[in-house]
Image (cartoon, rainbow, N blue to C red):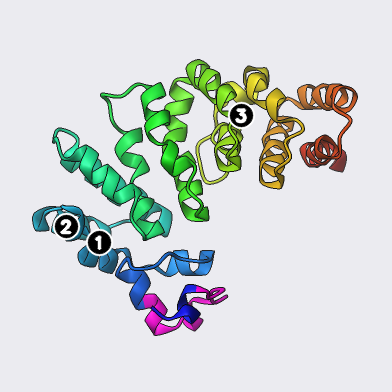
């Protein structure tokens, strides 16, 4: 494959994506490099050119294709969720499910890897510990799209098992991988983005202190932004909690990293 394609920066507009790049994306042969490309992938073409190699039957490929075509609100996120959920429905009682998951989660196409989290998040045979730990490879993925889809897929399960999830995630805050550390806060944001709110954390954000405290001076900008956003979410329902925590952190952790988190955390409070 030509180096120009491999090292491309990505078009800003969908109409500017070169045909050769779009074809390779739709064949599952390369990763997307920006949001424009990620949104431009034709999932119908992608599953029809890639799924048989993964071991998915033609009958199931056709069924998923029909579901995509008849969506009421088609979007990349909705299609990704639909495909992942359909795969779980087809293989939940099959011995093939682990093999399908492994092939999806290690595929060169980020769009195909994005289907994989649903095979774990929807699995009723797994507890929350198993769901999180078996998804860890995806949580540590280096692609922006996979990183967003995996926390959205697992978030409802985290909400339903909040106490145990916080216990697990607080341990993950010590992981050397910044993507895993960032997941601990992004998946538990009280309000979040494009997702259902976690009511327990909106009303009682102190539940997540075992996670937040460990990240108050994290060296990663990626993690700092997520912690700041978490607290900014909380400030919209429990401003006093955020005000007092920021005061405490300013004394306990006088670092530039903590200062940056505090500034981001207080942005809604400071506008008032």
Is residue 66 in sight in this rendering? no
Total numbered labels: 3
Near mark 3 (Cα within 10 A), the count class, few <14, some 14-19 or many ≥20, is many
Residue 121 x, y percent position in the rendering: 36, 34
Q: Quadrant of residue 191?
A: top right
Give the quarter of the figure containing the N terminus: bottom left
Which is more N-terminal, label 1 or label 2? 1
Relative to 25, does residue 186 appear above or below in the rendering? above
Residue 18 x, y percent position in the rendering: 44, 83
Q: Nearer the viewer, mark 3 or mark 2?
A: 3
- Magenta-tinted stretch: 7-22
Disc sitting over residue 173 in the figure: 3
Give the quarter of the figure containing the C terminus: top right
**Secondary structure of the residue carrying numbered label 3:** loop
Tell whether label 1 touches label 2 (CB within 8 Å).
yes
Residue 131 x, y percent position in the rendering: 37, 29
Disc sitting over residue 61 in the figure: 2
Q: Alpha-carbon distance for marks 1 and 3? A: 35 Å
Disc sitting over residue 4 in the figure: none
Q: Which residue is mark 1?
A: 47
Q: Quick check: is 10 in the magenta stretch? A: yes
**Secondary structure of the residue carrying numbered label 2:** helix
96 relative to 110 in the view: left or right: left
Near mark 1 (Cα within 10 A), the count class, few <14, some 14-19 or many ≥20, is many
Which is more N-terminal, label 2 or label 3? 2
Q: Nearer the viewer, residue 84 or 103?
A: 103
Q: Nearer the viewer, mark 1 or mark 3?
A: 3
């Amino acid at each position: 494959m030509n180096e120009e394609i491999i090292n491309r920066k990505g078009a800003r507009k969908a109409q500017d994506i070169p045909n050769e790049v779009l074809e390779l994306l739709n064949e599952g042969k390369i990763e997307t490099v920006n949001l424009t490309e990620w949104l431009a992938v034709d999932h119908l073409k992608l599953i029809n050119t890639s799924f048989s190699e993964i071991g998915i039957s033609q009958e199931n490929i056709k069924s998923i294709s029909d579901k995509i075509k008849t969506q009421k609100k088609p979007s990349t996120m909705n299609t990704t969720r639909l495909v992942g959920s359909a795969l779980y429905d087809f293989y939940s009682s099959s011995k093939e499910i682990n093999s399908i998951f492994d092939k999806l989660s290690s595929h060169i196409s980020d769009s195909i890897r994005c289907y994989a989290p649903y095979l774990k998040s929807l699995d009723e045979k797994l507890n929350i510990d198993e769901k999180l730990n078996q998804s860890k490879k995806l949580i540590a993925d280096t692609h922006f799209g996979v990183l967003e889809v995996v926390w959205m897929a697992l978030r409802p399960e985290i909400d339903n098992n909040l106490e145990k999830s916080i216990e697990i995630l607080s341990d993950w805050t010590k992981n050397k991988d910044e993507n895993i550390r960032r997941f601990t806060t992004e998946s538990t944001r009280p309000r979040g983005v494009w997702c259902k709110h976690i009511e327990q954390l909106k009303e009682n954000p102190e539940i997540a202190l075992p996670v937040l405290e460990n990240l108050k001076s994290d060296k990663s900008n990626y993690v700092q932004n997520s912690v700041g956003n978490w607290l900014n979410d909380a400030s919209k329902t429990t401003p006093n909690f955020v005000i007092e925590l920021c005061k405490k952190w300013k004394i306990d952790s006088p670092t530039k990293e903590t200062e940056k988190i505090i500034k981001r955390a207080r942005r809604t409070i400071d506008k008032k």
